[in-house]
């Protein structure tokens, strides 16, 4: 959409001239372009407003291309509109019927005209012809009633036999008028036609009742209910779900980290794709959420990355997966909970900002399967196996695939150090991977790691994650301080310069994935609960066994504080002396790492 061709002036006011893409013109009622006032006479202001206006239309066009399926909400609207329109049509026909007085006047006039024209003396045939118009007028009501009775009988018979031909013109008119795509003759199309037929039957029954003077009749068929909320017409420039989400993300009221918000955006985009582009943010309701939740329960893991589902729509993917010889595994309950939690956070903001009256996701999140951080700890024997394996002695090569095989290559990068530092500090992999050389320093006679977010790409999980952690004597004996000094001497900013720190997303994500595989390859991973993070849990158990309380342990491992007191003051909790005592108490009864000591 070339912007220089979209700014036009009519009189003194500037307009946006929006060119409808060829493939969407049918959905827009055949229009090739639309004009929209920018409500300004100033050229500079018009240019600024034009950019936002066109971006909104581009988003609308993208939504239209992504999904124009007939939704249940569309069917509800179609059924109600068909019923009410036909009832009103019957009332108009009834109001147009001639009264007895009008018929008498017409008869008198016909006789007068017949005498004047000579038809009265020309014989019975001429007289009948002269009275034809009167007969049509006098029998208008009865003929209309017969036609409707005939249609009613035909619809009932067709509905019983499954013949939709009589109603297809009405169905096609609604679909075309609203720019909706549906396979003609398919199951969904036939179900749509059946509901329109039921609406037609109901309006014909109202017609007969009103002909008998009873105007109190109401639909008996439960499908005929006035929709509470209606999808906005395709092409509407109202705010779509994702357009409003952009405002939510820009405000970020809860200061959510960019990578976390990115995941929330993907989750809400999935919901938006499911309900379709015609549903605006202000129209989200519980039924939509419930139906999406049912789809999530059948949604294949990594569906968008699976070739067999390429370019397929959401419901088609779910259906296709069920037909596969070996269906792809579906989302876990905790993952479904994450999707719904993302939408719930957004809807809570929508309620606060008067887009919605209530949060439709409230009370709809499934219960967790169990604690998200449920992990087993390493035994001393497992730690011995780990730290005597090829990665920590010598291995075949520097690629991950070679680290579990014995050889003569000594690896001393982050893959060597992160597990060791975790084992003697309880720090997270990302916290260790992003350390700067200046973060490892001496305070008095104590070497410490300063875990902070004081750089553009550095980040911590929560406020309490920013902490000082004394360096365990075992790490010093293995050579961690010397490694850091070598990085300083080489002019490196990072302790582990080979680790790329992304602006968004998880730091050291590849390490965590690959190290889990490594644990499997060396026989240490004996269950799903043994993972990289098990090293943090192992440290927590060590500190508890040493007699420390959880509120003291938190100062080392960096768990988020939940108490009111933790919100007061700026000084980090826990003296350095206490922290040294905590870290130095980490001791593994049978673990011997002397083979790793460096002179």
Image (cartoon, rainbow, N blue to C red):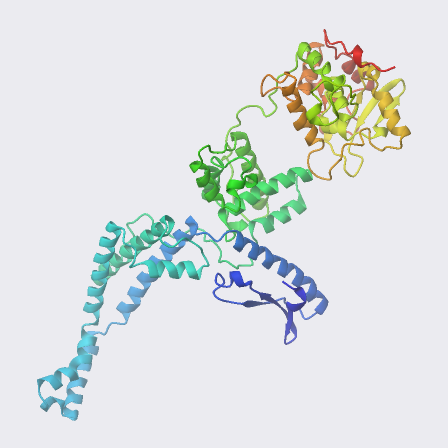
In the rendered image, the vertical position of residue 190 relative to residue 564, given as above or below: below
* Residue 237 % position (x, y): 56, 59
In the rendered image, the vertical position of residue 242 relative to residue 427, given as above or below: below
Q: Quadrant of residue 98?
A: bottom left
Q: Quadrant of residue 400?
A: top right
* Residue 553 % position (x, y): 72, 18
Residue at image position (51%, 63%) is 25
Q: Is residue 504 left or right of residue 29?
A: right
In the rendered image, the vertical position of residue 44 relative to residue 407, given as above or below: below
* Residue 38 % position (x, y): 63, 66
Q: Nearer the viewer, residue 488 or 18?
A: 488
Q: Quadrant of the N terminus?
A: bottom right
| Residue 564 in sight | no
| Residue 396 in sight | yes
Q: Is residue 420 left or right of residue 77?
A: right
In the rendered image, the vertical position of residue 269 relative to residue 486, given as above or below: below
Q: Is residue 440 left or right of residue 101?
A: right
Q: Quadrant of the C terminus?
A: top right
């Amino acid at each position: 959409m070339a912007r220089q061709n979209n700014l036009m002036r009519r009189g003194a006011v500037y307009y946006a001239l929006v060119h409808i893409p060829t493939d969407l013109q049918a959905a827009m009622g055949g229009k090739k372009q639309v004009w929209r006032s920018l409500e300004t006479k100033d050229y500079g202001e018009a240019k600024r407003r034009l950019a936002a206006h066109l971006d909104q239309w581009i988003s609308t066009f993208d939504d239209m291309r992504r999904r124009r399926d007939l939704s249940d909400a569309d069917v509800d609207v179609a059924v109600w509109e068909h019923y009410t329109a036909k009832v009103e049509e019957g009332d108009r026909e009834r109001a147009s019927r001639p009264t007895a007085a009008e018929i008498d006047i017409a008869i008198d006039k016909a006789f007068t005209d017949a005498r004047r024209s000579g038809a009265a003396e020309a014989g019975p045939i001429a007289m009948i012809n002269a009275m034809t118009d009167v007969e049509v007028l006098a029998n208008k009501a009865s003929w209309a009633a017969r036609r409707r009775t005939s249609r009613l009988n035909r619809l009932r018979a067709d509905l019983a036999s499954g013949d939709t031909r009589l109603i297809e013109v009405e169905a096609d008119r609604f679909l075309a008028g609203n720019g909706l795509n549906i396979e003609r003759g398919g199951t969904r199309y036939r179900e749509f036609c059946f509901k329109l037929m039921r609406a037609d039957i109901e309006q014909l029954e109202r017609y007969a009742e009103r002909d008998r003077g009873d105007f109190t009749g109401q639909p008996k068929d439960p499908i005929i209910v006035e929709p509470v909320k209606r999808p906005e017409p395709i092409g509407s420039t109202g705010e779509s779900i994702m357009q409003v989400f952009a405002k939510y993300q820009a405000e970020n009221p809860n200061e959510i980290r960019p990578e976390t918000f990115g995941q929330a955006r993907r989750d809400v985009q999935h919901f938006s794709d499911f309900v379709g582009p015609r549903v605006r943010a202000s129209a989200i309701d519980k039924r939509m959420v419930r139906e999406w939740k049912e789809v999530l329960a059948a949604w294949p893991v990594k569906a968008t990355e699976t070739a067999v589902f390429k370019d397929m729509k959401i419901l088609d993917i779910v259906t296709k997966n069920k037909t596969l010889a070996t269906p792809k595994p579906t989302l876990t309950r905790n993952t479904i909970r994450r999707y719904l939690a993302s939408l719930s956070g957004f809807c809570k903001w929508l309620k606060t900002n008067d887009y919605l009256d209530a949060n439709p996701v409230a009370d709809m999140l499934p219960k967790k399967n169990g604690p998200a951080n449920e992990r087993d700890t390493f035994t001393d024997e497992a730690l011995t196996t780990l730290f005597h394996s090829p990665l920590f002695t010598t291995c075949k090569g520097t690629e991950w695939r070679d680290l579990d095989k014995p050889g003569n290559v000594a690896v001393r990068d982050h893959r060597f150090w992160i597990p060791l530092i975790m084992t003697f500090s309880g720090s997270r992999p990302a916290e260790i991977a992003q350390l700067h050389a200046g973060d490892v320093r001496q305070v008095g006679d104590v070497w410490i790691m300063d875990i902070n977010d004081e750089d553009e790409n550095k980040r911590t999980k929560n406020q309490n994650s920013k902490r000082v952690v004394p360096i365990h004597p075992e790490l010093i004996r293995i050579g961690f301080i010397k490694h850091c000094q070598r990085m300083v001497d080489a002019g490196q900013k990072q302790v582990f310069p080979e680790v790329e720190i992304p602006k968004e997303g998880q730091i050291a994500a590849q390490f965590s994935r690959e190290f889990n595989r490594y644990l499997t390859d060396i026989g240490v991973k004996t269950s799903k609960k043994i993972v990289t993070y098990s090293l943090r849990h192992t440290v927590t158990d060590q500190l508890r066994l040493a007699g420390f309380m959880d509120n003291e342990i938190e100062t080392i491992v960096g768990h988020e504080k939940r108490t009111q007191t933790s919100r007061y003051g700026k000084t980090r909790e826990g003296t350095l002396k206490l922290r040294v005592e905590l870290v130095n108490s980490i001791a593994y009864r049978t673990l011997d790492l002397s083979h790793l000591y460096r002179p």
